[in-house]
Amino acid sequence: MFEDLIEFIRNLYNTNQVIPLHEPVFNQFDKQLVNEAIDSTFVSSIGKFVDRFENEIVNFTGTKHALATVNGTSALQVALRLAGVKHGDEVLTQSLTFVATANSIIHNSASPVFLDVDLDTMGMSPTALISFLDTYGIKKETGTFNKSTGKRIAAVLPMHTLGHPCRIDKIIEIADSWNLPVVEDAAEALGSCYKKKHCGTFGLLGVFSFNGNKIITSGGGGAIVTDDNHLAQKAKHLTTTAKVDHPWEFIHDEVGYNYRLPNLNAALACAQLTHLQQYLSRKRLLAEKYKYFFSSSTLGSFINEPQNSQSNFWLNGIITDSKDIRDRILKETNEQGIKTRPLWRLITELEIYKSFHKDDLNNSKQLQDRIINLPSSVNFK
Ligand SMILES: *Cc1c(COP(=O)(O)O)cnc(C)c1O
Protein backbone atom coordinates (compact mmCIF):
# COMPACT_ATOMS: atom_id res chain seq x y z
CA MET A 1 0.00 0.00 0.00
CA PHE A 2 2.52 2.55 1.24
CA GLU A 3 5.19 1.12 -1.07
CA ASP A 4 3.13 2.07 -4.14
CA LEU A 5 2.82 5.66 -2.98
CA ILE A 6 6.49 5.93 -2.10
CA GLU A 7 7.49 4.49 -5.47
CA PHE A 8 5.10 6.81 -7.26
CA ILE A 9 6.55 9.92 -5.59
CA ARG A 10 10.16 8.72 -6.07
CA ASN A 11 9.42 8.28 -9.78
CA LEU A 12 7.81 11.70 -9.99
CA TYR A 13 10.94 13.44 -8.72
CA ASN A 14 13.30 10.79 -10.07
CA THR A 15 15.68 10.93 -7.11
CA ASN A 16 16.89 8.81 -4.19
CA GLN A 17 17.56 11.94 -2.15
CA VAL A 18 15.20 13.55 0.34
CA ILE A 19 12.11 14.93 -1.40
CA PRO A 20 10.93 18.16 0.25
CA LEU A 21 7.30 19.18 0.54
CA HIS A 22 7.88 22.27 -1.54
CA GLU A 23 11.13 23.78 -2.74
CA PRO A 24 11.63 26.93 -4.78
CA VAL A 25 12.94 26.57 -8.32
CA PHE A 26 15.33 29.15 -9.78
CA ASN A 27 17.08 29.60 -13.09
CA GLN A 28 19.68 31.87 -14.69
CA PHE A 29 17.21 34.70 -15.15
CA ASP A 30 16.51 34.84 -11.38
CA LYS A 31 20.24 35.26 -10.76
CA GLN A 32 20.54 37.83 -13.52
CA LEU A 33 17.90 40.15 -12.07
CA VAL A 34 19.25 39.81 -8.52
CA ASN A 35 22.68 40.74 -9.88
CA GLU A 36 21.17 43.71 -11.68
CA ALA A 37 19.72 44.95 -8.40
CA ILE A 38 23.11 44.62 -6.70
CA ASP A 39 24.90 46.39 -9.57
CA SER A 40 22.40 49.25 -9.41
CA THR A 41 23.26 49.77 -5.68
CA PHE A 42 19.52 50.15 -5.09
CA VAL A 43 19.14 47.16 -2.78
CA SER A 44 16.75 48.58 -0.18
CA SER A 45 13.19 49.75 -0.36
CA ILE A 46 13.49 52.11 -3.30
CA GLY A 47 14.20 50.89 -6.80
CA LYS A 48 12.80 50.01 -10.17
CA PHE A 49 12.13 46.36 -9.30
CA VAL A 50 9.74 47.29 -6.50
CA ASP A 51 7.67 49.42 -8.89
CA ARG A 52 7.84 46.81 -11.64
CA PHE A 53 6.82 44.03 -9.25
CA GLU A 54 3.81 46.03 -8.06
CA ASN A 55 2.73 46.80 -11.62
CA GLU A 56 2.98 43.17 -12.57
CA ILE A 57 0.91 42.06 -9.60
CA VAL A 58 -1.70 44.62 -10.66
CA ASN A 59 -1.73 43.23 -14.20
CA PHE A 60 -1.72 39.61 -13.18
CA THR A 61 -4.45 39.75 -10.53
CA GLY A 62 -6.62 42.46 -12.06
CA THR A 63 -6.55 44.61 -8.92
CA LYS A 64 -6.11 48.39 -9.10
CA HIS A 65 -3.21 48.74 -6.67
CA ALA A 66 -0.49 46.50 -5.25
CA LEU A 67 1.96 47.41 -2.48
CA ALA A 68 4.98 45.24 -1.88
CA THR A 69 5.87 44.40 1.72
CA VAL A 70 8.63 42.48 3.52
CA ASN A 71 6.40 39.45 4.01
CA GLY A 72 2.83 38.24 4.03
CA THR A 73 2.43 38.58 7.79
CA SER A 74 3.27 42.30 7.76
CA ALA A 75 0.95 42.75 4.77
CA LEU A 76 -1.88 41.17 6.78
CA GLN A 77 -1.14 43.33 9.80
CA VAL A 78 -1.26 46.54 7.77
CA ALA A 79 -4.28 45.42 5.72
CA LEU A 80 -6.28 44.82 8.89
CA ARG A 81 -5.27 48.20 10.28
CA LEU A 82 -6.35 49.85 7.01
CA ALA A 83 -9.65 48.00 7.18
CA GLY A 84 -10.22 49.83 10.47
CA VAL A 85 -9.27 47.17 13.02
CA LYS A 86 -8.39 48.83 16.32
CA HIS A 87 -7.32 47.96 19.83
CA GLY A 88 -9.98 45.85 21.55
CA ASP A 89 -11.90 44.89 18.39
CA GLU A 90 -12.77 41.37 17.23
CA VAL A 91 -11.90 39.91 13.83
CA LEU A 92 -13.71 36.84 12.49
CA THR A 93 -11.35 34.29 10.98
CA GLN A 94 -10.88 30.53 10.63
CA SER A 95 -9.16 28.12 12.99
CA LEU A 96 -7.78 26.01 10.16
CA THR A 97 -4.99 28.25 8.90
CA PHE A 98 -1.34 29.10 9.28
CA VAL A 99 -0.60 30.93 12.52
CA ALA A 100 0.25 34.21 10.71
CA THR A 101 -3.45 34.79 9.98
CA ALA A 102 -4.28 34.90 13.69
CA ASN A 103 -1.04 36.66 14.65
CA SER A 104 -1.87 39.58 12.36
CA ILE A 105 -5.05 40.16 14.39
CA ILE A 106 -3.13 40.16 17.68
CA HIS A 107 -0.53 42.48 16.10
CA ASN A 108 -3.40 44.98 15.86
CA SER A 109 -4.26 44.44 19.55
CA ALA A 110 -7.56 42.85 18.50
CA SER A 111 -9.04 39.42 19.33
CA PRO A 112 -9.56 36.65 16.81
CA VAL A 113 -12.84 34.72 16.71
CA PHE A 114 -12.34 31.28 15.20
CA LEU A 115 -15.05 29.99 12.85
CA ASP A 116 -15.37 26.63 11.12
CA VAL A 117 -14.46 25.92 7.50
CA ASP A 118 -16.32 24.12 4.71
CA LEU A 119 -15.21 20.54 4.07
CA ASP A 120 -14.84 20.98 0.31
CA THR A 121 -13.01 24.35 0.17
CA MET A 122 -11.22 24.12 3.56
CA GLY A 123 -11.86 27.89 3.76
CA MET A 124 -14.22 29.89 5.99
CA SER A 125 -17.74 28.48 5.95
CA PRO A 126 -20.39 31.07 5.00
CA THR A 127 -22.86 29.04 7.08
CA ALA A 128 -20.63 29.35 10.13
CA LEU A 129 -20.26 33.08 9.49
CA ILE A 130 -24.04 33.65 9.24
CA SER A 131 -24.65 31.55 12.28
CA PHE A 132 -22.08 33.43 14.37
CA LEU A 133 -23.37 36.85 13.32
CA ASP A 134 -27.03 35.86 13.81
CA THR A 135 -26.24 34.60 17.31
CA TYR A 136 -23.82 37.25 18.53
CA GLY A 137 -24.01 40.21 16.15
CA ILE A 138 -25.85 43.41 16.90
CA LYS A 139 -25.82 46.51 14.71
CA LYS A 140 -25.37 49.84 16.44
CA GLU A 141 -24.74 53.34 15.17
CA THR A 142 -21.01 52.96 15.83
CA GLY A 143 -20.69 49.59 14.13
CA THR A 144 -21.42 45.90 14.50
CA PHE A 145 -20.91 44.54 18.00
CA ASN A 146 -20.66 41.18 19.70
CA LYS A 147 -23.59 40.96 22.17
CA SER A 148 -21.77 38.51 24.35
CA THR A 149 -18.40 40.29 24.73
CA GLY A 150 -19.51 43.86 24.07
CA LYS A 151 -16.60 44.26 21.67
CA ARG A 152 -16.84 45.78 18.22
CA ILE A 153 -16.58 43.26 15.36
CA ALA A 154 -14.25 45.06 12.96
CA ALA A 155 -13.53 42.74 10.02
CA VAL A 156 -13.77 39.29 8.47
CA LEU A 157 -10.54 37.51 7.53
CA PRO A 158 -11.04 34.33 5.46
CA MET A 159 -8.15 32.31 4.00
CA HIS A 160 -7.85 30.42 0.69
CA THR A 161 -6.44 27.15 2.00
CA LEU A 162 -3.61 25.47 0.07
CA GLY A 163 -4.50 27.69 -2.89
CA HIS A 164 -8.10 26.41 -3.14
CA PRO A 165 -10.55 29.33 -3.24
CA CYS A 166 -13.12 29.57 -0.45
CA ARG A 167 -16.74 30.70 -1.06
CA ILE A 168 -15.58 34.28 -1.10
CA ASP A 169 -18.63 35.74 -2.89
CA LYS A 170 -20.97 34.44 -0.18
CA ILE A 171 -18.62 35.63 2.58
CA ILE A 172 -18.54 39.14 1.10
CA GLU A 173 -22.33 39.16 0.74
CA ILE A 174 -22.80 38.24 4.41
CA ALA A 175 -20.08 40.65 5.60
CA ASP A 176 -21.67 43.45 3.53
CA SER A 177 -25.03 42.86 5.13
CA TRP A 178 -23.37 43.44 8.53
CA ASN A 179 -21.27 46.40 7.26
CA LEU A 180 -18.05 44.47 7.85
CA PRO A 181 -14.99 44.84 5.63
CA VAL A 182 -13.36 41.66 4.32
CA VAL A 183 -9.59 41.19 4.18
CA GLU A 184 -8.59 38.09 2.22
CA ASP A 185 -5.60 36.06 3.31
CA ALA A 186 -4.63 34.92 -0.19
CA ALA A 187 -1.04 34.21 0.88
CA GLU A 188 -1.22 30.73 -0.66
CA ALA A 189 -3.44 31.59 -3.59
CA LEU A 190 -1.46 33.53 -6.19
CA GLY A 191 -2.80 32.24 -9.50
CA SER A 192 -6.09 30.97 -8.03
CA CYS A 193 -9.43 32.27 -9.26
CA TYR A 194 -12.99 32.00 -8.03
CA LYS A 195 -15.65 32.45 -10.71
CA LYS A 196 -12.90 33.74 -12.99
CA LYS A 197 -11.86 36.54 -10.58
CA HIS A 198 -8.49 36.38 -8.86
CA CYS A 199 -8.42 35.43 -5.17
CA GLY A 200 -7.47 38.37 -2.98
CA THR A 201 -9.34 40.88 -5.18
CA PHE A 202 -12.86 40.33 -3.78
CA GLY A 203 -12.45 41.95 -0.39
CA LEU A 204 -11.64 45.54 0.57
CA LEU A 205 -8.02 44.38 0.75
CA GLY A 206 -6.19 41.15 -0.06
CA VAL A 207 -2.78 39.81 0.83
CA PHE A 208 -0.22 37.57 -0.90
CA SER A 209 3.00 35.99 0.34
CA PHE A 210 6.23 35.38 -1.57
CA ASN A 211 7.92 33.35 1.13
CA GLY A 212 10.29 30.57 0.04
CA ASN A 213 7.61 27.89 0.32
CA LYS A 214 4.94 29.66 -1.77
CA ILE A 215 4.26 29.16 -5.50
CA ILE A 216 6.81 31.83 -6.42
CA THR A 217 9.21 33.49 -4.03
CA SER A 218 11.22 36.64 -3.43
CA GLY A 219 13.05 35.04 -0.49
CA GLY A 220 10.73 36.91 1.81
CA GLY A 221 7.99 39.14 0.54
CA GLY A 222 4.34 40.03 0.54
CA ALA A 223 1.83 42.27 -1.16
CA ILE A 224 -1.32 44.14 -0.25
CA VAL A 225 -3.84 44.55 -3.06
CA THR A 226 -6.86 46.83 -3.16
CA ASP A 227 -9.09 48.72 -5.60
CA ASP A 228 -9.36 51.65 -3.20
CA ASN A 229 -7.07 54.57 -4.14
CA HIS A 230 -7.04 56.08 -0.68
CA LEU A 231 -6.23 52.78 1.08
CA ALA A 232 -3.47 52.04 -1.43
CA GLN A 233 -1.89 55.39 -0.69
CA LYS A 234 -2.18 54.80 3.06
CA ALA A 235 -0.68 51.31 2.67
CA LYS A 236 2.38 52.76 0.99
CA HIS A 237 2.65 55.54 3.56
CA LEU A 238 2.31 53.26 6.60
CA THR A 239 4.78 50.67 5.29
CA THR A 240 7.42 53.34 4.59
CA THR A 241 7.65 54.76 8.15
CA ALA A 242 4.81 57.22 7.40
CA LYS A 243 7.36 59.67 6.03
CA VAL A 244 5.92 62.81 4.52
CA ASP A 245 7.18 63.54 1.01
CA HIS A 246 9.90 66.20 1.22
CA PRO A 247 13.23 66.68 -0.60
CA TRP A 248 15.29 66.58 2.64
CA GLU A 249 13.23 66.86 5.84
CA PHE A 250 12.42 63.85 8.05
CA ILE A 251 8.80 64.33 8.94
CA HIS A 252 6.69 61.35 9.96
CA ASP A 253 3.02 62.00 10.58
CA GLU A 254 2.07 58.61 12.07
CA VAL A 255 3.81 55.75 13.88
CA GLY A 256 4.47 53.73 10.73
CA TYR A 257 6.34 50.56 9.90
CA ASN A 258 9.48 49.69 8.01
CA TYR A 259 7.69 47.03 5.97
CA ARG A 260 8.55 47.90 2.35
CA LEU A 261 9.96 45.09 0.23
CA PRO A 262 13.67 45.67 -0.55
CA ASN A 263 14.51 46.14 -4.22
CA LEU A 264 16.87 43.14 -3.95
CA ASN A 265 13.96 40.86 -3.09
CA ALA A 266 11.74 42.58 -5.64
CA ALA A 267 14.29 41.71 -8.35
CA LEU A 268 13.88 38.03 -7.52
CA ALA A 269 10.11 38.48 -7.38
CA CYS A 270 10.09 40.02 -10.89
CA ALA A 271 12.11 37.14 -12.27
CA GLN A 272 9.91 34.58 -10.53
CA LEU A 273 6.77 36.24 -11.90
CA THR A 274 8.00 35.47 -15.41
CA HIS A 275 7.86 31.75 -14.46
CA LEU A 276 4.41 31.91 -12.89
CA GLN A 277 2.32 30.77 -15.89
CA GLN A 278 4.64 27.85 -16.44
CA TYR A 279 4.62 26.93 -12.75
CA LEU A 280 0.82 27.05 -12.74
CA SER A 281 0.60 24.60 -15.63
CA ARG A 282 3.21 22.36 -14.00
CA LYS A 283 1.21 22.41 -10.76
CA ARG A 284 -1.94 21.47 -12.64
CA LEU A 285 -0.14 18.64 -14.41
CA LEU A 286 1.24 17.38 -11.08
CA ALA A 287 -2.26 17.51 -9.60
CA GLU A 288 -3.53 15.41 -12.53
CA LYS A 289 -0.83 12.83 -11.87
CA TYR A 290 -1.68 12.59 -8.17
CA LYS A 291 -5.39 12.51 -8.95
CA TYR A 292 -4.83 9.59 -11.32
CA PHE A 293 -2.73 7.72 -8.76
CA PHE A 294 -5.31 8.14 -6.01
CA SER A 295 -8.21 7.18 -8.28
CA SER A 296 -7.07 3.60 -7.75
CA SER A 297 -5.54 3.83 -4.28
CA THR A 298 -7.24 3.01 -0.99
CA LEU A 299 -4.96 5.36 0.98
CA GLY A 300 -7.09 8.46 0.49
CA SER A 301 -8.95 10.74 -1.91
CA PHE A 302 -7.22 13.47 -3.83
CA ILE A 303 -8.23 17.01 -2.83
CA ASN A 304 -9.48 18.56 -6.04
CA GLU A 305 -10.21 22.21 -6.77
CA PRO A 306 -13.63 23.22 -5.43
CA GLN A 307 -16.58 24.04 -7.71
CA ASN A 308 -16.53 27.35 -9.61
CA SER A 309 -12.85 27.78 -9.05
CA GLN A 310 -9.48 27.44 -10.62
CA SER A 311 -6.87 26.52 -8.05
CA ASN A 312 -3.13 27.09 -8.25
CA PHE A 313 -2.68 23.65 -6.59
CA TRP A 314 0.04 25.18 -4.42
CA LEU A 315 0.13 22.08 -2.22
CA ASN A 316 -1.41 18.82 -3.35
CA GLY A 317 -3.11 16.80 -0.68
CA ILE A 318 -5.27 13.81 0.07
CA ILE A 319 -7.88 13.18 2.67
CA THR A 320 -7.66 9.80 4.38
CA ASP A 321 -10.47 7.79 5.99
CA SER A 322 -9.03 8.13 9.47
CA LYS A 323 -6.39 9.82 11.57
CA ASP A 324 -4.81 6.41 12.02
CA ILE A 325 -4.18 5.94 8.29
CA ARG A 326 -3.04 9.56 8.05
CA ASP A 327 -0.46 8.99 10.79
CA ARG A 328 0.81 5.77 9.22
CA ILE A 329 1.31 7.40 5.82
CA LEU A 330 3.14 10.31 7.47
CA LYS A 331 5.43 7.90 9.32
CA GLU A 332 6.16 5.58 6.39
CA THR A 333 6.83 8.37 3.89
CA ASN A 334 8.94 10.54 6.20
CA GLU A 335 11.04 7.54 7.22
CA GLN A 336 11.75 7.10 3.53
CA GLY A 337 12.83 10.73 3.10
CA ILE A 338 9.59 11.89 1.52
CA LYS A 339 8.51 14.98 3.40
CA THR A 340 4.76 14.68 3.49
CA ARG A 341 3.11 16.91 6.09
CA PRO A 342 -0.17 17.14 7.99
CA LEU A 343 -2.16 20.37 7.90
CA TRP A 344 -1.34 22.94 10.57
CA ARG A 345 -2.43 22.28 14.13
CA LEU A 346 -5.73 24.14 14.57
CA ILE A 347 -4.92 27.61 15.86
CA THR A 348 -7.44 27.09 18.67
CA GLU A 349 -5.36 24.16 19.92
CA LEU A 350 -2.23 26.25 20.32
CA GLU A 351 -1.68 27.25 23.94
CA ILE A 352 -1.34 30.93 22.93
CA TYR A 353 -4.80 30.98 21.28
CA LYS A 354 -6.78 28.70 23.61
CA SER A 355 -8.63 31.48 25.38
CA PHE A 356 -10.30 33.01 22.31
CA HIS A 357 -13.87 32.39 21.17
CA LYS A 358 -14.32 29.44 18.85
CA ASP A 359 -17.06 27.58 16.96
CA ASP A 360 -17.62 23.86 17.39
CA LEU A 361 -15.11 23.47 14.49
CA ASN A 362 -16.31 19.98 13.47
CA ASN A 363 -15.15 20.32 9.88
CA SER A 364 -11.83 21.90 10.83
CA LYS A 365 -11.09 19.01 13.21
CA GLN A 366 -11.98 16.39 10.63
CA LEU A 367 -9.74 17.99 8.03
CA GLN A 368 -6.91 18.53 10.46
CA ASP A 369 -6.95 14.87 11.47
CA ARG A 370 -7.15 13.41 7.99
CA ILE A 371 -5.31 15.57 5.46
CA ILE A 372 -1.80 14.92 4.23
CA ASN A 373 0.08 17.29 1.96
CA LEU A 374 2.30 15.67 -0.65
CA PRO A 375 5.50 16.89 -2.29
CA SER A 376 4.41 19.60 -4.72
CA SER A 377 7.51 21.33 -6.08
CA VAL A 378 7.34 22.11 -9.79
CA ASN A 379 10.66 20.42 -10.54
CA PHE A 380 9.14 16.97 -11.00
CA LYS A 381 10.21 15.02 -14.07
C1 LIG B 1 2.59 31.96 4.23
C2 LIG B 1 1.36 32.42 4.85
C3 LIG B 1 1.25 33.66 5.50
C4 LIG B 1 2.39 34.55 5.86
O1 LIG B 1 3.28 34.82 4.90
P1 LIG B 1 4.81 35.18 5.25
O2 LIG B 1 5.25 35.78 3.97
O3 LIG B 1 5.48 33.87 5.57
O4 LIG B 1 4.83 36.13 6.38
C5 LIG B 1 0.02 34.08 5.97
N1 LIG B 1 -1.06 33.30 5.84
C6 LIG B 1 -1.01 32.09 5.27
C7 LIG B 1 -2.24 31.30 5.16
C8 LIG B 1 0.20 31.59 4.77
O5 LIG B 1 0.23 30.38 4.23
Image (cartoon, helix red, strand yellow):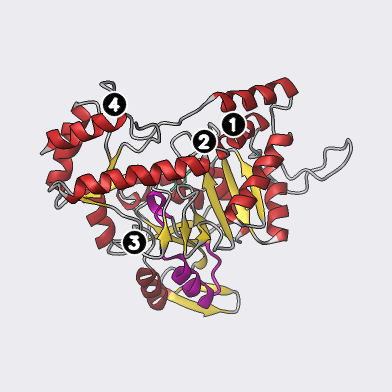
Question: Label 3: how many residues lie within 10 Å, few (<14), some (14-19) or many (20+)?
Answer: many
The quadrant of the rendering that contains the N terminus is top left
Residue on which disc 1 sits: 268
For the point 58% across and 54% down, the residue is 61
**Neighbour class for label 1 at 10 Å: few (<14), some, many (≥20)?**
many
**Which residue is labeled 3 in the image?**
117
Residue 369, given in percent of the width and then of the height, sits at: 21, 50
Q: Residue at x 33, y 34 (%)?
A: 21
Q: What amino acid is found at the position of numbered circle 3 in the picture?
A: Val
Circles 1 and 2: CB distance less than 8 Å?
A: yes
Is the C-beta of the residue carrying label 2 under 8 Å from the nearest atom of ligand 1?
A: no
State how far apart marks 4 and 3 are (Cα): 36 Å
Boundaries of the magenta span = 160-182
| Mark earlier in primary sequence (1, 2) | 2
Q: Quadrant of residue 306?
A: bottom left
Query: Which residue is under mark 4?
Result: 14
For disc 2, the marked residue is: 217
Assess disc 4: are there few (<14), some (14-19) or many (≥20) residues with their C-alpha within 10 Å of its C-alpha.
some
- x and y percentages locating residue 302 in the rendered image: 25, 51
Residue 107 within the magenta-colored segment of the rendering: no
Q: Earlier in the sequence, mark 4 or mark 1?
A: 4
Q: Nearer the viewer, mark 3 or mark 1?
A: 1
Instruction: Give the quadrant of residue 344.
Output: top left
Looking at the image, residue 85 sits to the left or right of residue 137; the answer is right
Q: Furthest residue to the left? A: 1
